[in-house]
């Protein structure tokens, strides 16, 4: 009998496994937390005391390396480089991808109920479904603005840019970016480089600073890059409505209007809420509270990580400190801890605590321009762009994918030189 079409299976079980009960590990979400946890689990499978079946539940067919999403707009990178398919990434493993959406988690009965109707039983559960765009504060607030967090968002933006390009013979293309956080600043620089003299990019943010949570040298590099590209920045500007041609906002006590052919909405994200009938205790940010081992308080076999979890940081003197930021960096570091701890529970070994190490901050600031700050150093410009590119290359999933990308980069260096 064939597999259901949405189940990508690469099952390598041997005939001797058939009569032994399988340990079922279910991972919900195939992003930085879920996919990297699945890949880390794969490395433990040979040492597992029983046969194991790992299922990754993820509605999309491609993983997306979000920090490099901006490079698609300037054609510095190709979609296959930053968004390899799960089939390609998991093809050499025994992990199955179930291309489906989680509806609810039934903790008492150890079941994941899928939107598609059926349920998956589990022995261990990993929940890493990330975050979603911050909802608008009021109806009509966001209107026709485009989000920017997935590959599909890039295609929609590309489509609109192409339409505007065709119509632009007559005048300047006006782009408004809502939000002066990292996504807004990175996107504004890339869009300004892409549009050149044909476009004008404006950033609006209701707060008084760009990149509020970032170190001063990085903020200064970003401000310089925005200025060099002629990006106009209005801080203390609270957007009220967005319609087909205008953004209306409050600025210095007045209602102002900014013409806009295109509006991109990057005002931050909020964690996805727990998809269960039995809600977990949330943090003030809406994240699930977890123990330092990343298990939920009420069930040793359920782990939450990434943007959805308030992952406590244990300080050097082993006291609880603050929590890890909602970044790929945190989810990437948490993934192997969860994989280890599931194996440790099965093999009756000690569990590890999550220990977050901040490796620095990096932002792309236009074509071949970036700022990289960490360990007391700050590199900008072309050297920054090269450093950032290699730092991310090291973190692409699977050695096979890294090798494909490296071959492509090396061949393009030799072809263009
Ligand atoms: C444009 C952009 C740029 C970024 N740049 C950086 C950066 O430079 N550095 C950095 O550290 N961080 C960056 N981030 C943040 C980073 O992407 C997130 O913090 C990180 O991806 C969180 O990992 P996660 O595993 O929790 O969630 P994600 O990586 O978002 O993965 C969640 C997965 O769950 C899936 N999912 C959602 N709902 C369901 C459901 N109901 N059922 C099944 N699956 C579901 C989603 O499809 C997704 O694949 C950026 C984010 C964006 C959007």
Image: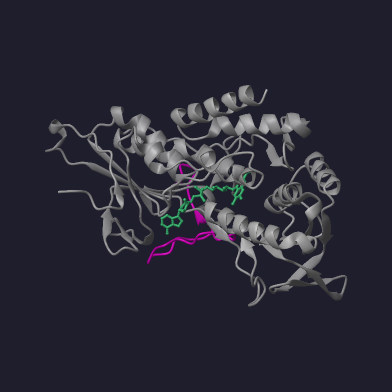
- 24 left or right of 81 in image: left
Tally of marks: 0
Position of 10 relative to 394 (above/below): below
In which quadrant of the rendered image does the C terminus lie?
top right
| Between 397 and 215, the one nearer to me in the picture | 397
Q: Residue at x 13, y 31 (%)?
A: 16
Q: Residue at x 32, y 40 (%)?
A: 95
Magenta stretch: includes residue 286: yes
- 3 left or right of 255 in image: left
The answer to whether residue 380 is visible is: no
- 146 left or right of 29 in image: right
- Residue 8, located in which quarter of the rendered image? top left
Q: Which residues are magenta?
A: 271-294
Residue 64 in the image: state x and y as whole percent: 51, 46
Residue 366 in the image: state x and y as whole percent: 74, 43
Magenta stretch: includes residue 290: yes
Residue 148 in the image: state x and y as whole percent: 61, 56
Residue 196 in the image: state x and y as whole percent: 78, 49
| Between 58 and 22, the one nearer to me in the picture | 58
Position of 90 relative to 107 (above/below): above
- Residue 89, located in which quarter of the rendered image? top left
Kindly report the secondary structure that dominates the magenta region of the rendered protein: loop
The answer to whether residue 136 is visible is: yes
- 201 left or right of 46 in image: right
- Residue 222, located in which quarter of the rendered image? top right
Q: How is the image coloured?
A: one colour
């Amino acid at each position: 009998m064939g597999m259901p079409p949405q189940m990508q299976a690469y099952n390598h079980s041997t005939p001797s496994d058939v009569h032994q009960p399988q340990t079922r590990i279910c991972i919900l979400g195939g992003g930085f937390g879920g996919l990297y946890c699945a890949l880390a689990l794969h490395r433990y499978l040979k040492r597992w005391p029983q046969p194991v079946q790992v299922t990754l539940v993820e509605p999309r067919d491609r993983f997306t390396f979000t920090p490099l999403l901006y490079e698609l707009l300037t054609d510095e990178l190709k979609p296959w480089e930053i968004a390899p398919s799960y089939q390609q990434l998991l093809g050499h493993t025994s992990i199955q991808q179930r291309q489906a959406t989680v509806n609810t988690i039934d903790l008492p009965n150890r079941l994941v109920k899928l939107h598609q109707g059926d349920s998956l039983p589990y022995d261990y559960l990993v929940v890493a479904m990330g975050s979603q765009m911050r909802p608008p504060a009021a109806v009509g607030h966001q209107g026709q603005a485009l989000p920017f967090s997935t590959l599909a968002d890039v295609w929609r933006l590309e489509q609109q840019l192409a339409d505007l390009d065709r119509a632009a013979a007559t005048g300047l293309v006006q782009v408004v970016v809502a939000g002066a956080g990292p996504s807004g600043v990175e996107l504004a620089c890339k869009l300004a480089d892409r549009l050149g003299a044909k476009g004008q990019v404006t950033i609006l943010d209701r707060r008084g600073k760009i990149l509020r949570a970032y170190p001063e040298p990085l903020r200064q590099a970003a401000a310089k890059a925005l200025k060099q590209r002629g990006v106009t920045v209005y801080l203390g500007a609270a957007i009220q409505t967005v319609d087909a041609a205008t953004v209306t906002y409050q600025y210095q006590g007045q209602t102002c209007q900014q013409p806009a052919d295109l509006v991109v909405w990057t005002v931050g994200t909020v964690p996805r809420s727990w998809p269960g009938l039995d809600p977990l205790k949330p943090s003030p940010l809406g994240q699930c509270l977890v123990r330092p081992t990343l298990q939920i308080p009420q069930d040793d076999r359920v782990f939450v990580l990434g943007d959805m979890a308030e992952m406590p940081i244990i300080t050097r003197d082993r006291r609880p400190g603050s929590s890890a930021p909602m970044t790929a960096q945190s989810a990437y570091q948490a993934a192997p801890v969860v994989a280890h701890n599931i194996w440790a529970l099965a093999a009756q070994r000690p569990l590890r605590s999550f220990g977050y190490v901040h490796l620095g901050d990096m932002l792309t600031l236009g074509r071949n321009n970036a700022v990289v700050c960490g360990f007391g150093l700050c590199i900008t410009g072309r050297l920054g762009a090269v450093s950032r590119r290699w730092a991310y290359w090291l973190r692409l999933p699977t050695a096979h994918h890294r090798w494909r990308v490296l071959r492509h980069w090396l061949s393009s260096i030799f072809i263009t030189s």
